Image (tube, rainbow, N blue to C red):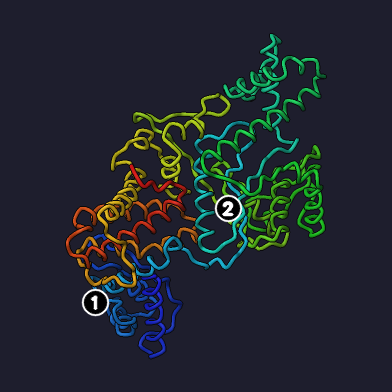
Amino acid sequence: MVREELKQALSAALSAAVAKGELPAVEAPPVILETPPDKRFGDFSCNLAMTLAPLVGRPPRAVAEVLVRHLRLPEGRLERTEIAGPGFLNFHLHPAWLRETVRQILAQGERCGRSDIGGGQRVNLEFVSANPTGPLVVANGRQAAFGDCLARLLECCGYSVTREYYINDADRSTQVQKFGESLEARYRQIFGEEAPVPEDGYQGEYVAEMARAIAAEAGDRYLSVEAESRRKVFRDLALNRVITGQQADLAEFGVSFDVWFRESDLFARGAVEETLAVLREGGHTYESEDALWLRTTAYGDEKDRVLVRATGAPSYLAADVAYHRDKFSRGFDRLIDVWGPDHHGHIARTKAGVQALGYPTDRVDILIVQIVRLYSGGEMVRMSKRAGELVLLKDLVADVGGDAARFFFLMRSHDSPLDFDLELAKQESPENPVYYVQYGHARICSILREAEERGVSLPDPGQVNFDRPEAEDELALMRKLADLPEEVQLAAAKYEPHRMTRYAQELARAFHSFYTTCRVLGEDSELTAARLSLVIAARHVLRNTLQWIGVRAPERM
């Protein structure tokens, strides 16, 4: 990796300067390389000298001079290094370094960008986990796209990932009870009975649709069932139909799970009671106001939390802590939870419970995926689950397509709200980012088809003279290809899948510019071979990038 090798060389330069007594020993700040907006300032820029200056008590430019003096890289790596402004280090890469990157990509083929830095660590990635009280909506779709892309990135970096969906279906759930009662009321209304939907129940049309389907299948046979039994019947009917529908919607969206974990199983197995017993024995609980409390303040929470209510019913926290204990018991090295924004307040208490059980919290990461705001015709589309104004994930996919939905969901960091432009997502134009990227891949494939039609053999990478490409757009494309390994590893390590949609757009832009200014299939056979090789390398990288995002790489458009 170009970036990584340069960063390591800078770290080594600092160590060498300290060893020679030219700089005092200090805790080194991180080495950060940035791409300057203006190529006159090089391929990479680094502010290490400026961050070191106040630590070592020297002017930034003087520190920069020391670092450059000790910078050691193999021949053919850097064309030149400049000290600019108050102490920036600007690095101009030697084209030979970029050409070697292209050779590596061609040698790796479909495996380019992959690594084994994860070392086979087992990761449990739980995401979506929507309440089983209705179909999946666009917010769930963003969580699905984020979790699935993150899983793919972790896997390509050598982690063993289990994708898990948690179904909140325990009998104690008032939401589930209200949902079942709402379905029962709609069913009874079909047969002329006076049965109002419960206050704060579910008014959505999807509930009425489910009731009509049940009536068509079973007729009026549930009317004669005793009231209490009928409520349980409709609770189970509601749960099973919604869960089946959620599974179908996710499958259509290209998202699959290895485990569908039911909360009710935790209670049925006694896992919740076992967890409460462990917490009691460890002295992490106390009783007050007829309730059982967890001392979460001992682990940084703002106040202690109820584990068992005065009614004797376990709280949501009790089940959540038991669930995380179950995950660890299955041998996972790391747990990643992907939650919606309405669960932000649960992070501290959940981590406190995990820590009280004796597990290190640095093995648990809880990520919040922020809201999605849909826009149509410049107006925001409003939605409310209980009022019935739903924008369903399956409807969005049907409207804009699965590729556009996934790409747009991943265009912003998960911790930022996302504005989704429905009209833009459907455009077949360069303004639509997913179309622009996919068209780049299709254009690559068209070049390769044309080469085949002309009888131009695809070059053997070992025989290609890579010294020939010298146009700026060729070198710019090489630079972007060289960024792939670090982009993938950072996206996986920092849980930032949005880096990949950004990288895909930058790579497509670099390729389109190259295509516009550089003739690939020309009279010069040596130059044609070099440029065809560059095109093939771009195809490998762009196809893999789209695959990690979960978007198709079409060969024709």
- Which residue is under mark 2? 366
Q: Visible in this render: residue 333?
A: yes
Please give left or right for residue 204 compared with residue 444 in the image.
Answer: right
Q: Quadrant of residue 556?
A: top left
- Viewer-side residue, 19 vs 549: 549
Is 157 situated above or below 450? below
Residue that lies at the very extreme toward the front in this rendered image: 455
Which image quadrant: the C terminus?
A: top left
Mark 2: give few (<14), some (14-19) or many (20+) Cα within 10 Å: some
Task: Tell me where residue 364 appears, x and y as whole percent.
Answer: 61, 58
Task: Tell me where residue 342 appears, x and y as whole percent.
Answer: 56, 41
Residue under the point 69% across and 55% down: 327
Task: Tell me where residue 435 appears, x and y as whole percent.
Answer: 34, 43
Amino acid carrying label 2: it is Ile
Is 389 situated above or below 489? above
Q: Which of the two discs, 1 and 2, labels the residue nearer the N terminus?
A: 1
Residue that lies at the very extreme toward the bottom in this rendered image: 20
Residue under the point 70% across and 46% down: 317
Foreground label between 1 and 2: 1
Is 290 situated above or below 150? above
User: Which label was assigned to residue 303?
Assistant: none
Residue under the point 27% across and 52% down: 453
Label 1 – label 2 distance at C-alpha: 44 Å
Residue that lies at the very extreme toward the left in this rendered image: 523
Amino acid carrying label 1: it is Arg
Q: Secondary structure at mark 1?
A: strand
Mark 1 and mark 2 residues within 8 Å of each other at the beta carbon:
no
- Viewer-side residue, 127 vs 222: 222
Residue that lies at the very extreme toward the top in this rendered image: 192
Q: Visible in this render: residue 87?
A: no
User: Which label was assigned to residue 80?
Assistant: 1
Q: Secondary structure at mark 2?
A: strand
